[in-house]
Amino acid sequence: MALPAAGIGRLDARPGPQPAGPPLPPGTTTLDLGGPEALVAVPAGGGEPRPLLVFCHGAGGTAHQSLAAVGEVALARGVAVLATSSAAATWDLLTGGLGRDVAVLDAALDRVASGTAVSRVALGGFSDGASYALSLGLANGDLFDALLAFSPGFTAPPGRTGRPRVWIAHGTGDRVLPVDRCGRRVSGDLAAAGYDVTYDEFDGGHVVTPALVTAALDTWLGPPG
């Protein structure tokens, strides 16, 4: 698989309302990309364009764990979910620079774009995956209209494009990534930089819960109804 230019972190795929290939079936499909695992979960229903949430797991996680964290709530809201596994124990940004994981994600997005009608795209993640989603998402704000970060540690975007909306949640009892130097600082820095930031601080630890997933989707899509 060809890698993007070192350090750029730009994604070329552009999912849209008119896919060029045969439709992906409802349920979970494994995308054969010849590299780390990539899974896409498509809600039941017609072929109308639907929101797509791309979700990045925490350190040591997998694409399956991403779907387990957000898939049930997202699918119930009619949101398709794309999840890839990092090539190493965590994402490339944290292990030396953007490269292979960006290429895998771009290839996965391209496959989804060919088989699923998409109305809008958000990038989310948990822990290291949240830091990755914020960093990569700020560089690709012309693709992602929202960034959904569950317990992020930092942001380190290679560039900034567009103005995606940002939702961040962090637990006051988080002992992995303490809230005062992570969620509070990250949300404050992004708000000071002019981004539309919603910050949800909750009584809990380093977790993703269905209630938090619901809050993230409500911020992105609006309450159901």
Image (cartoon, grey):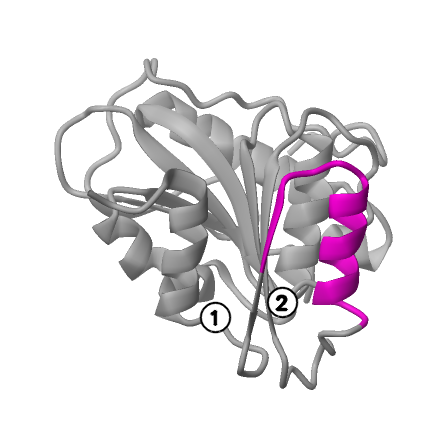
Query: Along the line of sight, which residue is nearer the eye, 41 or 17?
Result: 17
Q: Which residues are magenta?
A: 181-199
Q: Report which residue position mark 2 lands on.
A: 151
Q: Amino acid at mark 2?
A: Ser
Magenta stretch: includes residue 135: no
Question: In which quadrant of the rendered view does residue 72 lie?
Answer: bottom left
Q: Residues within 10 Å of mark 1 (few under 14, many from 20)?
A: some
**SS for callout 1:** loop
Q: Is residue 6 visible?
A: yes
Question: In which quadrant of the rendered view does residue 178 lie?
Answer: bottom right
Query: Along the line of sight, which residue is nearer the eye, 87 or 214?
Result: 214
Label tally: 2
Label ID, residue 208: 1
Magenta stretch: includes residue 192: yes
For the point 26% across and 50% down, which residue is it?
75
The quadrant in which the C terminus is found is top left
194 displayed left or right of 210: right
Q: Position of residue 51 (x, y in %)?
A: 36, 34
Q: Are marks 2 and 1 in contact (CB under 8 Å)?
A: yes
Q: Amino acid at mark 1?
A: Val
Query: Along the line of sight, which residue is nearer the eye, 151 or 13?
Result: 151
Q: Is residue 39 visible?
A: no
173 displayed left or right of 213: right
